[in-house]
Image (tube, rainbow, N blue to C red):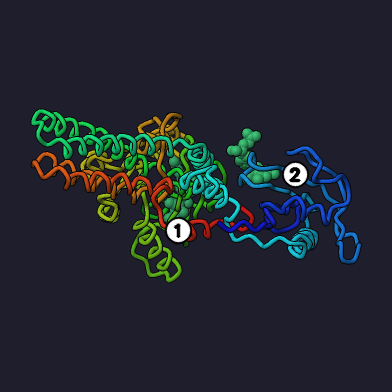
Amino acid sequence: MDTETIAAISTPVGEGAISIVRLSGDEAVSIASKVFQGKDLHEVSSHTINYGKLIDPETNELVEESMVTVMRAPKTFTREDIVEINCHGGMVSVNRVLELVLTNGARLAEPGEFTKRAFLNGRIDLSQAEAVMDLIRAKTDKAMNIALKQMDGRLSKLIHTLRQELLETVAHVEVNIDYPEYDDVEEMTNQLLIEKSQKVYDQIEKLIETAKQGKILREGIATAIIGRPNVGKSSLLNALAQENKAIVTEVPGTTRDVIEEYVNVRGIPLRLVDTAGIRDTEDIVEKIGVERSRQVLKEADLVLLVLNYGDEFTEEDRRLFEAASGMDVLVIVNKTDLPQKLDLDKVRETAETASIIETSILHEQGIDQLESEIADLFFEGDLNNADMTYVSNARHVQLLKDAKRTLKEAMEGMEAGMPIDMVQIDVTRTWEILGEIVGDTVQESLIDQLFSQFCLGK
Ligand SMILES: Nc1nc2c(c(=O)[nH]1)N(C=O)[C@@H](CNc1ccc(C(=O)N[C@@H](CCC(=O)O)C(=O)O)cc1)CN2
Ligand SMILES: Nc1nc2c(ncn2[C@@H]2O[C@H](COP(=O)(O)OP(=O)(O)OP(=O)(O)O)[C@@H](O)[C@H]2O)c(=O)[nH]1
Ligand SMILES: [Mg+2]
């Protein structure tokens, strides 16, 4: 492995109070000592921070004022010696300090190289390393919690257990191959194999099922608000956002373009998209808006279809239902404060299995119920199940699906009485696929590619 000492700016670029230049590797302490005027960094206690001046040894000129932490291997982020130089947060300052350590023996780190070293030195596995990146990119509290647990090794442990069980299964197969003369061993083995495999299969399936929720927690539920002009779509967005984000007027066709807003409904992130009321229109601006609305609808996970209680059910309403058919739909009958003109029986008939919620957004009624319907629809209320291990990474989901398919083939082989060594191939393959999640059985090129997606200095 490459053991050069690496360095990078580990804080965001821009003006701030403090910025950190981080070094990792055998030479980290001696490089830092060369440029540091203060206590002898070779002598200071590990994990302590020390004040001193940074001096260019070539010119003896003052470069910066700093606080420097020395962390000695192996109890560090990379398991190598680490030095962190805390300097004043400014673009020039931090770049000068980086420049200084680079001219004194460090090499500029590649994106993700610190975390990659943590992985290569065995402090964390691949799924934990990926979680580091997910954590940085998390946009919601829940997404962050998933990443945090994955970083802590939740998923790793589960995958490890599954692989262990598969190994035992393979061991049983080997007994069978080695002692084919014992008929009863074969009987027993086959039965046991099927049982054990089924157990692993069920758990893989469960994990895959968490992926939909994992994705939602990471990216938010793409929610399209659709409805005829003036039914109260923008009012609904504002009510859920608890802010006046969209313009609301009594004029039909007020919203001309697509308005997007992240809102938090009972801990579930919604990416709400308020659309121009879908209707046939001659107005060119509105026409473009309507076209975009149709596009939004295509990409939505959830559709909030708004109707007007004070108006008749029209052909346009019916067409909206048609456009949203096959999707997760909640029907919102708004303006219940107005005299009823809407034929609710007709709505129920058209809505089929979709829930219908009556609201008067003007009078802040029905919003609570709408929120709990949304929560139920996606999480059956158990979002706060802290024990759940969610899979949220696309690479992991794909591998789990591959593992599931391969194991299925193995099980079918067992049931069909296929030669036992054939079955063994599929079980072993499943074991390998699961190993790719944690990075046990994974190609170097993939590792390089995964870490290169990290940010610089991580
Ligand atoms: N200044 C600073 N803050 C930071 C980081 C950093 O690198 N520098 N981190 C960077 O992401 C995170 C902390 N992550 C870390 C994870 C593990 C270890 C570590 O030394 N682990 C040792 C055990 C340490 C002990 O128990 O004392 C190990 O696992 O062997 C350090 C930092 C967040 N805050
Ligand atoms: N009576 C009554 N009026 C409401 C209710 N909700 C919204 N409104 C009013 O209906 C009008 C239209 O509301 P918007 O939220 O702009 O409707 P929209 O669906 O976004 O309309 P477009 O953007 O034109 O498609 C405004 O005057 C709102 O104040 C309600 O529950 N009851
Ligand atoms: Mg509007």
Towards the viewer: 305 or 417: 417
The answer to which quarter of the image holds residue 368 is top left
Dot 1: few (<14), some (14–19), or many (≥20) neighbours within 10 Å?
Answer: few
Counting from the top left corner in percent of width and height, residue 261 is at: 51, 50
* SS for callout 2: strand
Residue 404: image location, x then y, percent:
26, 45
In contact (CB < 8 Å): disc 1 and disc 2: no
Please give the label number shown on residue 292: none
Residue 98 as seen in the image, left or right of residue 172: right
N-terminal of the two: label 1 or label 2?
A: 2
Amino acid bearing label 2: Val
- In the rendered picture of this protein, how many numbered marks are placed on residues? 2
Q: Which of 223 and 368 is in front in this view?
A: 223
Q: Residue 437 vs residue 411: left or right?
A: right
Name the secondary structure under disc 1.
helix
Residue sitting at x 32%, y 42%: 208
Give the residue displayed 90% in from the left and 59% down from the top.
62
Place residue 424 in its image quadrant: top left
Q: How crowded is mark 2: few (under 14 residues within 10 Å), some or many (20 or more)?
A: many
Rendered image: mark on residue 444:
1
Q: Name the residue under label 2.
A: 70
- Image coordinates for residue 16, horizontal then vertical, percent: 76, 52
Q: Does the residue labelled 2 lie within 8 Å of ligand 1?
A: no
- Name the quadrant of the N terminus: bottom right
Does the image show residue 225? no
Can see residue 251? yes
Amino acid type shown at disc 1: Glu
258 vs 329: above or below: below
Mark 1–mark 2 Cα distance, whole angstroms, equals 31 Å
Instruction: Work out whether residue 432 or residue 216 is closer to the camera in this orientation and state it.
Output: 432
| Residue 101: percent from left, percent from top | 76, 60
